[in-house]
Image (tube, grey):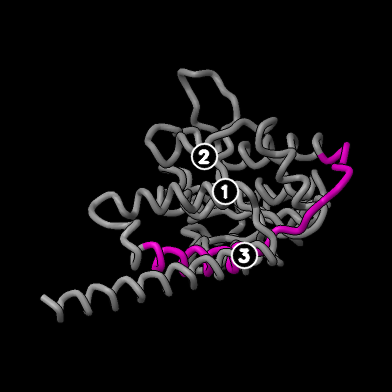
Amino acid sequence: MIANCRVVLVRPHYAGNIGSAARAMKNFGLADLVLVAPVADPLAHQARMLAAGATDILDAARTMPDLATAVGDCAMVLGTSGEVAGTLRSTLVGTPRELLPKFAGVLAATRGALVFGPEPHGLANEELAICHGLLVLPTAPDYTSLNLALAVGIALYELHNILATPPATAREPAPYAAFDRAMEHLHAALTDVRFLFGQNAEALMHAFRHLVGRALPTDQEVKMLHGLARQLEYAADQMKRAEAQLGKKT
């Protein structure tokens, strides 16, 4: 199951951290490394030196332009951050013991991704909006900032321990890309029926996405979401027709 876990480093700034992260991956049996718009060169000397015996992971690492593309085929995506302030972050946050058992269940059936932000400031809210949860590694409260490679190592250690006792059953959630298409469809439909309007529309949609996302819908359930969106579009069309008829009468 551990092989189904992808490690995604978003805009890493230091080659040494990329190499050290690859080494941590090899320690725990992972090989799928994706770099999103890296600032540092993953093939630089420092990266290869700190990777030690994990240069094969560096050589096979893929580069993607954005996070949505990097996790498009993953059914569950967990971001990592020491910053939990704000409405969006507080709705996602959880410890390894809270979030990783469900993540491990996903890995029993399909791919999942652990996402780590850039060293200077971590993941942006727009990137966290893609994630199903925000994994916070417990630290001393007065210094929560972890080195990127250290954070990768701790998260994989926690996951490794959980996978030592695999879940009895597993259901296969839909890939992120399929879920995202359904949510975009619903976004348009909810706008049409005026559920989403005004300055709070996007914040409300983020909350709605994460409400649905926490259920990790399957392919069949994603089709149901599209069906719901189509019915909302039909209702919006009927509402517009009724308003037009009323306008003619007046």
Looking at the image, residue 62 sits to the left or right of residue 123; the answer is right
Observer-nearest of 32 and 2: 2
Residue highlighted by disc 3: 222
Residue highlighted by disc 1: 132
Q: Residue furthest front?
A: 249
Magenta residue span = 163-190
Circles 1 and 2 in contact, beta carbons < 8 Å: yes
Q: CA distance from mark 3 to mark 1?
A: 15 Å
Looking at the image, residue 239 sits to the left or right of residue 27; the answer is left
Observer-nearest of 227 and 151: 227
Residue highlighted by disc 2: 92
Residue type at mark 2? Leu
Q: CA distance from mark 1 to mark 2?
A: 7 Å
Task: From the image, state whether disc 2 or disc 3 is nearer to you.
Answer: 3
Image location of residue 209, percent across then percent down: 49, 53
Residue at the spot 82% in from the left edge and 51% down from the top edge? 170
Magenta stretch contains residue 178: yes
